[in-house]
Image (cartoon, rainbow, N blue to C red):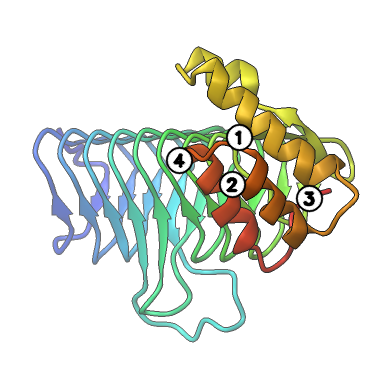
Amino acid sequence: MISPLAHVDPSAKIGNNVTIHPFAYIDRNVEIGDDCEIMPYASIMSGTRMGKGNRVFQGAVLGAEPQDFKYKGGDTLCVIGDNNVIRENVVINRATYAEGQTQIGNNSFLHEGVHICHDTKVGDHCVLGYGCKVSGNCMIEDCVIFGGNILMSQGTRVGRWAMVQTGCRFRKDVPPYIIGAGEPTVYHGVNAVVMAHEGFPEKIIKHISHAYRILFQGNTSVLDALFMIKDQVPMSEEIQNILDFVGASKLGVIR
C-alpha cells in the first residue's frame, strides 16, 4: 500500500492498511495510524502524530515548522486525531515550544487552503471552509462551522456549536451556540437551525436565546449580564457552557 515512488523515512511509524501514493513525503519522527490515506505530493513533516482513518489530499503540509519568531528549532508536535478529511493545500503548523501542541480532533473536515497556525486547537466534528486562516494559539471547540475565507486573529476562541459566516474576520471571542456575521463580526442570532437538526430540545434553544438577549441586547456590563443569566435562565449544560466561556474570555466577546 506504500508506493515505491513515495519518500518514507525509515524511522517513520506507519500503521496497518495505510495507503501512501506516489510522490508523497513522510519525514522522520512521524507516526501515522491505521487506515490512513496520503495522496500524491502531500507532506507529513517531523513531529506529526496522526490517528486512524485520516485522508490527506494533494499539496497538504502537516507538521510544518511554526511561523513564529519565538521558534528556535527543535522537535515540537502536531497531533491529529481520527477520521479527519484534510483537503488540498491545507497547512497545519506544529507547536512553537516542546511543551505545546497543535491539535486537530476527530471527524473534522478542513477544506482546500485552510491554514492552522502553531499551538491552535481544533475540536471534534468541525468544518472549516475554503481558505480559512486561523492564527496561532487559537481555540475552536467542538461542532464549529466556518464559512470560507475567515480570518481568526491570534489567541481568539470560538465556542462549541457556533457558526461563523463567510468572509468574517474577528479579534475577539465568538461564544458558543451563536451565528457570527458581518464586518466587523457581530452576534447574528442563535445557531438554532443546525442545533434543532442535531437534536437540541426546543426548550434549550429558547433558554440559549434568552441568555444571549441578556448578554447582547441588555444595557449592562458583561459581568452583570452573567449574574442576570444565572438568576433568570434555567440552568443546563448549555447555559453553564455560555457562562464559563464568556467568563473566561481574556479578549472579550464579539458585540
**Element under disc 1:** loop
The secondary structure type at the circle numbered 3 is loop
Q: Position of residue 149 (x, y in %)?
A: 73, 38
At x 63% / y 33%, what residue is drawn? 208
Q: Residue 252 occupies which quadrant of the picture?
A: bottom right
Q: Amino acid at mark 4?
A: Glu
Q: Judge whether 128 appears above or below 6 on screen.
A: above
x, y percent for residue 238: 51, 38
Residue underneath mark 1: 177
- Which residue appears farthest toward the left when viewing the image? 16
Quarter of the image holding residue 186? top right
Relative to 235, is 67 above or below?
A: below
Q: Is residue 216 left or right of residue 17?
A: right
Q: Residues within 10 Å of mark 4 (few under 14, many from 20)?
A: few
Residue 196 appears left or right of 164: left
**Which circle, 1 or 4, is nearer the viewer?**
4
Q: Amino acid at mark 3?
A: Ile
- Which marked residue is nearer to the observer: mark 4 or mark 3? 4
Q: Position of residue 3 (x, y in %)?
A: 20, 37
Identify which residue, 186 or 23, lies in the foreground: 186
- The answer to whether residue 17 is left or right of residue 59 is left
Mark on residue 237? 4
Residue at position x 32%, y 65% in the image: 47
Is residue 157 depicted above or below 96 in this figure? above
Labelled pair 2, 1 in contact (Cβ < 8 Å): yes
Answer yes or no: is residue 31 visible.
yes
Between disc 2 and disc 4, whose residue precedes?
4
Q: Earlier in the sequence, mark 3 or mark 1?
A: 1
Instruction: State which tag comes first along the sequence, 1 or 4.
Output: 1
The residue that disc 2 covers is 242
